Amino acid sequence: MKKSFVYVLAPIVALIIFGAIYWNFSSGYEAKEEAKALKVKQEKEAKLLAQAKANEQAIKDANAGVLRRKAEREAKEAKDKKDHEARLVATDARDKAFADKEKFAKLVTRLENDIKNEQSAITKLGEEKKMAVEEQAFLRTYVQKAEENVKNLRQVLEKIAAADAARAAAEAAAARAAKNKE
């Protein structure tokens, strides 16, 4: 019997051990599977939530980037506009300076020509003055000589008149003497 006991008892013991393991496995298996499924579901939800938060943060970052780029573009446009206006002002100032330079160069040339003309006029006036002084000196000497000539001519006329009067007196005396002689 001993042998048959082993044939019966070993499968019964194996059945009991299998039943215990199966019962232990089957009672905890559904809970474990549910826990695993719950854990997977929670991980998926956490992953989706994290993904949603990441997407939301990415959208906020993108919006912030858009606003930052817009602000940078506006600042760049304002700077470019300011630089453009500064270039225009500088160009206008350069053009005005060039025009003033040309105007003043022409003015300097004109004034230099005026100075040359006036200097030549002054030289001519100096020559005319010198000639006038020489002419005045000449006229003084001429007037003196003319006055001497007039004086000499008066003396000559007086001598002629005296000689004519003497001759007329001599003729009258000769005519009287000839009348008296007759």
Image (spheres, rainbow, N blue to C red):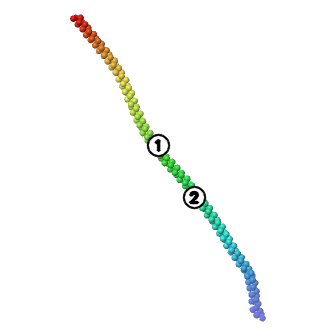
| Residue shown at the point (35%, 23%) measured from the top left | 142
| Residue shown at the point (42%, 36%) measured from the top left | 118
Front-most of 10 and 95? 95
When asked about the image quadrant of residue 177, the answer is: top left
Left or right for 36, reference 109 = right
The numbered mark, 2 or 1, whose residue comes first in the sequence reads 2
- Image disc number at residue 73: 2
Reading the image, the residue beneath label 1 is 104
* Label 1: how many Cα within 10 Å (few below 14, some 14–19, many 20+): few
Left or right for 169, reference 58 = left
- Could you tell me which quadrant the N terminus lies in? bottom right
Depth check, mark 2 against mark 1: the one in front is 2
Front-most of 133 and 169? 169
When asked about the image quadrant of residue 141, the answer is: top left
Q: Secondary structure at mark 1?
A: helix
Q: Marks 1 and 2: in contact by CB < 8 Å?
A: no
Q: Is residue 3 above or below residue 94?
A: below
